[in-house]
Image: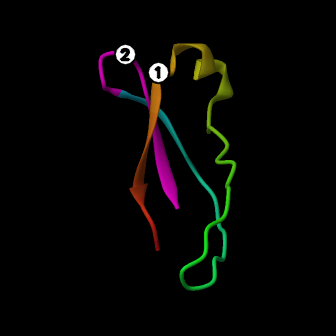
């Protein structure tokens, strides 16, 4: 999965990705690391961009 980390203006500050396997109809909690964690204090929300 790929995720964007957005600032208060809705513009992407950073992105990250993680790989996880989930069985059909299942759920799983995933930690997606930022590429540049130095931007973490400016992030207001996260958006899943793609799931492959």
Q: Is residue 3 magenta?
A: yes
Q: Does the magenta stretch include residue 35?
A: no
Which residue is drawn at the image coordinates 37% and 16% (left, top)? 8
Where residue 23 sits, quadrant-wise, is bottom right
Query: Looking at this view, is 39 or 26 the one in front?
Result: 26
Please, is residue 23 above or below residue 47 in the view? below
Rendered location of residue 13, percent (x, y): 44, 27
Q: Are marks 1 and 2 in contact (CB under 8 Å)?
A: yes
Task: Decide which of tag 1 and tag 2 comes sooner along the chain.
Answer: 2
Q: How crowded is mark 2: few (under 14 residues within 10 Å), some or many (20 or more)?
A: few
Please, is residue 52 above or below residue 33 in the view? below
Where residue 51 sits, quadrant-wise, is bottom left
Rendered location of residue 14, percent (x, y): 49, 33
Describe the element under mark 2 as helix, strand or loop: loop
Which residue is drawn at the image coordinates 67% and 43% (left, top)? 33
Which residue is drawn at the image coordinates 63% and 77% (left, top)? 22
Rendered location of residue 27, percent (x, y): 61, 68
State left or right for residue 36 relative to residue 9: right
State left or right for residue 11 relative to residue 30: left
Using the numbered discs, state the Cα–Cα distance from disc 1 to disc 2 in whole angstroms: 5 Å
- Magenta residue span: 1-11
Say the numbered circle drawn on residue 44: 1
Which residue is drawn at the image coordinates 60% and 14% (left, top)? 41
Q: Name the residue carrying label 2.
A: 8
């Amino acid at each position: 999965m790929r995720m964007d980390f957005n600032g208060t203006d809705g513009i992407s500050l950073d992105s990250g990705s993680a790989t996880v396997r989930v069985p059909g109809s299942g759920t799983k909690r995933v930690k997606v690391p930022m590429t540049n964690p130095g931007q973490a204090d400016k992030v207001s929300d996260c958006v899943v961009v793609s799931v492959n």
